[in-house]
């Protein structure tokens, strides 16, 4: 599934948030965006998701415009946004309710099992760790069954150890699911670990300044700084962010 963002510009009143921003996400790719805090990255996801409309430019999914059209992509914010009065299973069921589809409990159980959550299916959010809450939110996003996943700093609020575990878990899940992902992060390390391509953006307004293709083999990336090419790519991205 091919997503194409073409020269979009957007402003809140007289404040220009992004100007002539373009990016491409091709089928099965994991594409990351790195940019400063408060630069408008989340606004980009609102535009792709049809919650906002750009003043100019186009957003195409398989060559068809999705400007202003909701429900074309799945969106997961940094906060898990789980309903506290619903169990884990019931929170995942929300994805089916939105689609007006009768939830298949066997299907939900299978998703939870793959996420290591089957044993807590009837727990409430407050009974879960931060990492487990994020897993529930991600499984709910997967259950929406949309071709593109937009993940907005999903691990940003987690401690370093939990974040590493979640990154590894996400890699395994996406290897099975073969979904197309657009991912926002502040972490260069996280972007290199997960991505096929990385867009570095500058703020005020948000614009793409550099694009990096990550050629480090997936099975080498767990070595991180010991992997061939890791340090060089990290340095290039750091320089691009200055």
Image (cartoon, helix red, strand yellow):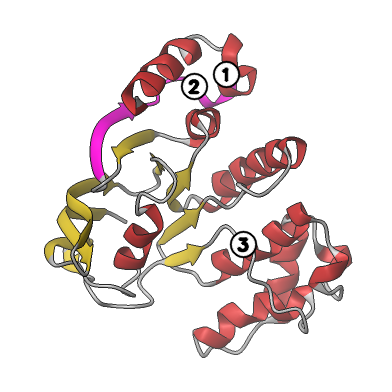
How dense is the environment of label 1, judged by Cα within 10 Å: few (below 14), some, or many (20 and up)? few
CA distance separating discs 2 and 3? 31 Å
Residue under circle 3?
Answer: 79
Q: Is residue 242 above or below residue 235?
A: below
Would residue 135 be found to the left or right of residue 99 on screen? Answer: right
Is residue 205 shown in magenta? no
Q: Position of residue 75 (x, y in %)?
A: 47, 65
Q: How far apart are labels 3 and 1 at the CA level?
A: 30 Å
- Where does label 2 land, which residue? 217
Q: Which residues are magenta?
A: 207-219
Q: Is residue 32 above or below residue 123?
A: above
Q: Position of residue 63 (x, y in %)?
A: 16, 61
Q: Secondary structure at mark 1?
A: helix
| Mark positioned earlier in the residue sequence (3 or 1) | 3
In percent of width and height, residue 204 lies at 26, 46
Residue for point 49% across, 55% down: 151
Verify CB contact (< 8 Å) between mark 1 and mark 2: yes
Q: Is residue 143 left or right of residue 199?
A: right
Q: Are marks 3 and 1 in contact (CB under 8 Å)?
A: no
Mark 2 secondary-structure assignment: loop
Q: What residue sits right under mark 1 in the picture?
A: 220
Task: Check disc 3 and report its element: helix, strand or loop.
Answer: loop
Q: Point out which mark residue 2 bears.
A: none
Image point 36% across, 34% down: which residue? 197
Q: Nearer the viewer, residue 43 or 176?
A: 43
Whether the magenta-drawn stretch holds residue 210 is answered as yes
């Amino acid at each position: 599934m091919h997503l194409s963002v073409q020269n979009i510009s957007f402003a809140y009143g007289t404040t220009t948030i992004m100007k002539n921003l373009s990016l491409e996400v091709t089928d099965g790719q994991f594409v990351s965006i790195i940019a400063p805090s408060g630069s408008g990255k989340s606004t980009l996801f609102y535009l792709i998701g049809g919650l906002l409309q750009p003043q100019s430019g186009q957003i195409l999914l398989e060559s068809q415009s999705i400007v202003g059209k909701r429900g074309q992509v799945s969106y997961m914010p940094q906060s898990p946004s789980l309903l506290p009065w619903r169990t884990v299973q019931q929170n995942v069921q929300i994805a089916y309710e939105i689609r007006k589809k009768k939830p298949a409990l066997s299907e939900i159980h299978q998703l939870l099992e793959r996420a290591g959550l089957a044993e807590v299916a009837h727990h409430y959010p407050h009974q879960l760790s931060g990492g487990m809450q994020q897993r529930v939110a991600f499984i709910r996003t997967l259950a929406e069954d949309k071709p593109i996943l937009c993940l907005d700093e999903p691990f940003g609020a987690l401690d370093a150890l939990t974040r590493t575990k979640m990154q590894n878990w996400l890699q395994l899940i996406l290897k099975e699911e073969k979904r197309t992902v657009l991912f926002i992060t502040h972490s260069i390390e996280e972007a290199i670990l997960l991505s096929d391509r990385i867009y570095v953006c500058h703020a005020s307004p948000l614009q793409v300044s550099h694009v990096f293709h990550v050629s480090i083999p997936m099975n080498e990336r767990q070595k991180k700084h010991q992997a061939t090419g890791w340090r060089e790519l990290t340095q290039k991205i750091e320089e691009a962010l200055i």
